[in-house]
Image (cartoon, rainbow, N blue to C red):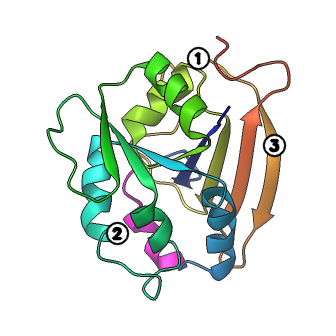
Amino acid sequence: MGAIHVHEFMSLDGVIDAPTWTFEYGFLPEMGEAIGAVTGRCRGILLGRTTYELFEPAWSTRTVEDDPGAPFFNDTTKYVVSGTLAEATWRNSEIVGPYDPDSIRRLKDETGDLYVSGSVTLVHALLADGLVDELHLLVYPLTRGSGPRLFPEGAAPAALSLAACRPFDNGVVYLSYRPHAGQEPGAR
């Protein structure tokens, strides 16, 4: 049985939009190691259409010399959740169709651990359906004021347990959370 690992770049006030606001903090090697520990155990990448369309041109031409994460993003099978994308043009990509929690459960059981990044609409649905097994957050020391949030207005309350916490010299903090003991993923 696989697990779904969601990774997000997040502001202190919970905004997870396109993280161009992270650039001034740099990306320390230790931050890459934290993400690499997550991607290293994942057998597939689960993406929403918008993030897939942003990631393809950004990652498809990168090599390991450009970024140590390039082999993971290019060589790992990408499963795209979309009811509108007609063709997946990035190698090792499959369209799984519109969001369906039962299809996602089957995919994670068949594939093993899945990595999700960005994909705010997909992440909201996964969280609402209790399908996220672990959140991996790089929290930046700034507020955005507005923008899409990890937990949107009206989201059901949830209890989480801290799995890891690591501060970095640039002020960013890595936090990892799992569903609270006794609250299994998929439970409502």
Using the rendered image of the protein, determine whether residue 152 is visible from the camera's viewpoint. Answer: no
The answer to the question of whether label 2 and label 1 lie on touching residues, with beta carbons closer than 8 A, is no
Q: Which mark is residue 59?
A: 2
Stretch in magenta:
17-25
Residue designated by label 1: 156
Of badges 2 and 3, nearer the viewer stands 2
Q: Is residue 18 magenta?
A: yes
Q: Nearer the viewer, residue 46 or 132?
A: 46
**Looking at this rendering, what residue extends furthest in the top direction?**
188
Of labels 2 and 1, earlier in sequence is 2
Label the magenta part by its dominant secondary structure. Answer: helix
Identify the residue at horizontal 51%, vertical 39% (top origin). Answer: 150
Q: Position of residue 56 (x, y in %)?
A: 28, 61
Mark 2 to mark 1 CA distance (whole Å)? 34 Å
Against 139, is 182 above or below?
above
Residue 30, image x and y in percent? 69, 76
Q: Which of these two is toward me, 131 or 95?
A: 95
Q: Earlier in the sequence, mark 1 or mark 3?
A: 1
Mark 3: secondary structure: strand
Question: Which residue matches tag 3?
Answer: 162
Residue 19 in view = yes
The local crowd at label 3, few if under 14, some if 14 to 19, many if 20 or more residues have their Cα within 10 Å, is few
